[in-house]
Image: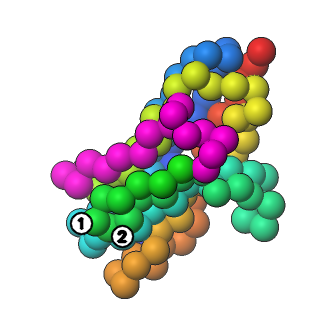
Amino acid sequence: QVALLESGGGSVQAGGSLRLSCTAAGLTSNNCGVDWYRGPTMKRREWVSGISGDGSTDYADSVKGRFTISTDKAKDTVYLQMNSLKPEDTALYSCKASGLLCAYYYGQGTQVTVSS
């Protein structure tokens, strides 16, 4: 097993944008579903967005219209494009994979901080 690697977080002002990445060997080539969460720990996290192996996407109401999830199969990477960021989007963002050949260790997450 390998670990998921999240990156792309940072500090931005309200209204700004960031693009998060979640990558691991085989992540998209194995048609894994990938979900993004945010929160300090695995038990205290909020689901943000998800993309299935067939490309279907879904979003939490709080981010709908502002965030976009997508994949780059050539890079085995799932992106979360975050626009019009708000202070309440501040959190540790982490990704989770699901599917038959998709057993990955959790990564460290990537911190997003939005200042007003």
**Quarter holding residue 16:** top right
Where's residue 9, x and y in %?
A: 57, 34
> Magenta residues, as a range?
60-75
Q: Nearer the viewer, residue 56 or 116?
A: 56
Where's residue 21, x and y in %?
A: 44, 44
Q: Single out the residue that lies furthest toward the left.
A: 74
Q: Is residue 98 above or below residue 84?
A: below
Residue beneath the point at 54% across and 50% down: 59
Residue beneath the point at 51% across and 34% down: 65
Q: Is residue 22 above or below residue 28?
A: above
Where's residue 19, x and y in %?
A: 47, 33
User: Taking the image as drawn, is residue 26 in sight?
Assistant: no
Q: How busy is the neighbourhood of tag 2: few (under 14 within 10 Å), some, or many (20 plus)?
A: many
Callout 2 amino acid: Cys
Q: Nearer the viewer, residue 104 or 53?
A: 53
Q: Is residue 14 above or below residue 64?
A: above
Q: How much space separates mark 1 and mark 2, taking CA atoms?
A: 8 Å
Callout 1 amino acid: Ser
Left or right: residue 45 versus residue 58 is right
Q: How busy is the neighbourhood of tag 1: few (under 14 within 10 Å), some, or many (20 plus)?
A: some
* Residue 40 falls inside the magenta stretch: no
Quarter of the figure with the C terminus: top right
Secondary structure of the residue carrying numbered label 1: loop
Residue denoted by label 1 = 29
Dot label at residue 32: 2
Secondary structure of the residue carrying numbered label 2: loop
Residue beneath the point at 45% across and 79% down: 103
* Residue 69 falls inside the magenta stretch: yes
Left or right: residue 106 versus residue 72 is right
